[in-house]
Structures are given as structure tokens and as C-alpha cells.
Amino acid sequence: MPTGLIPPLLAGLVDDAALVSGGGTVPLDTAALLDAASVHRDHTTAWYAALVGPLLIPASALGQARASGVRPEIAVIADTGLDAFVAARPLIDRHFTLRQVEVAVAKRGEDPQPGLHRLIRALASGAAPRGYAEVPLSWGLLGALDTVSAARAAGAPVAVKFRTGGLAAELFPTPVELAAIICACRERELPFKVTAGPHHAVRSADPETGFVHHGFLNMLVGSLLAADGGEVADVAEVLATTDPMRLIEAVRVRREEPRPLWEGFGASAVIDPLTDLIRFGLVNGGFD
């Protein structure tokens, strides 16, 4: 397999979310699981393998995945709740290689603290090698970030995850709101992921819904700027731009550096962000 075609800045950027869609789980059967596992295996043996993270599997589908013979490295979305995931951990260990668990700790408008503390206690007891707390972008967010920061300082393998899109307009943070969140993570040295997030490399409107989606290059460059100490207004300007050349050049000059702050996003079709990266000359020899 060719090596060196995915630079460090892009390594592990895209999780395989073929089994997760639209902010929830898609109906799954054995055929769907087998197909997703086969495609994921192709990704992990392709020249762009370094771009791809684990296969995301809803906890509600673990039994079907076991019966189907699916055996990739996985990240479990705890859609049936944290307690059910913990109870299923022995089954997971017998049949899968678990990289992480991702848990929605509260609904919008709910206090995220109880769910956060349950997740942190579960991780301390060895429930998963790593956990991502999905925190709503609403009341209680900054306090939740403080809790996660304190837990990480005490050695807990926990990070945060944000929903940056979905089926309703209020689920899409504005560039200023998202910039403030990224800078808040920077101030606390908190790595984060996003879900229901970027569909394309550059910020753009969905022609069917009219919703404006954040671009993954916008988020990458915005995170670089925030990590360098950029102010919220400057990060928001990057998140709002629709000029691809500005983003492409910012990525080019930092391509050999590890990616700060932002740990990546899930894509229902890994080939889509890969295609954008190829089109913009950012992978597959584009740096030669």
C-alpha cells in the first residue's frame, strides 16, 4: 500500500458513519451491516486508509453485528443508554475491538452534568478505552466543558462531541457560535469531535433544505487558528468563508503538523470528503 499520501494534519479525520444518519440510527439488517463492514474494510486497506477512523456502530445493532460476523475496529454510539452499553461490554470484547464510546449526555435544555458524571465514572471503571460526551449546544455548555476539563486533568479518557447540524435549523450553530465553542475548547485544552456535521469541504447551502452546512476545511482551518490563539471573531470569519483557495492554502502550509483540537467528524460516505480533498489537491500526491 502506498504510504505518505495522507499528511499528519488529515490523519484520522473522517470516521465511517455509514450506519448512522441524520442525527439518529438508520434501520439495520444483516445485509446492511455486512455491506458497511465490507466497505469499511476496503477503506482501511486503501491508499487513503490513514484518513479513516473507526466504523461507528449503534449499540442497538451490536447483536446483529455479532451475528453477521462484522469484525472491524469500532466506536459504539450508545443509543440505548450508557447502562446498556456497560452491560454489553463483555459481548463487545468477545467479538470486536472497541476504540471508543460516544454518549449523548443530555437533551437540549437539560442539565448535562448528571449524564457527564455518569460517563466519567463509567470510564474510570474501564467501560471503554475512551469516551466522547455529546454535549448539547445550549444551556449548561460551558459548565460541562469545565467538568470534562477537570476530569481529563484527573486522568479520565474523556473528550467532547458537538452536534453541528441535523434536521432542524436550530441544530446548526452560526459561525460565531461555533467559533466561541472552539475557542472555549482551546482555553480548556479540550479535544472535540462533531457529529451531523460537515457534508462538504467548504461551507455551503443544501439545495433541498436550504440549511447552510459548515465545511470541514472551514472547521479545520478555524481550529488551527484557534489553537494559535485566534480570537472568536477571527475564527468565525474563517468558518463563514466560502472561498476555497483561502482554506486550501491554509491547510497546505500546515500539512505536516498534527491536527490540534478538532479530532474529526463522521461521514455517511467516506468517499465524499475524500473526493473533495482530491479535487482540491490536498491528498493523493497533491502536495508533491
Image: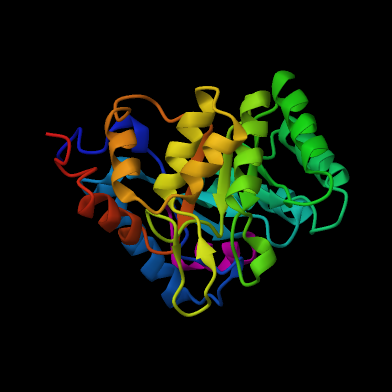
212 displayed left or right of 187: left
Q: Is residue 61 magenta?
A: yes
Residue that sits furthest to the left in the current view:
288
Q: Position of residue 216 (x, y in %)?
A: 43, 49
Observer-nearest residue: 273 or 38? 273
Image quadrant where one finds the C terminus = top left
In which quarter of the view is residue 158 placed?
A: top right
Q: Position of residue 38 (x, y in %)?
A: 33, 63
Image quadrant where one finds the N terminus = top left
Residues shaded magenta:
59-72
Res 213 seen here = yes
Q: Residue at x 26, y 38 (%)?
A: 6
Q: Position of residue 224 (x, y in %)?
A: 46, 31
Q: Is residue 65 above or below residue 209?
A: above
Q: Is residue 180 above or below residue 24?
A: above
178 displayed left or right of 142: left
**How many labels were placed on the picture?**
0
Q: Is residue 113 magenta?
A: no
Q: Position of residue 29 (x, y in %)?
A: 50, 77
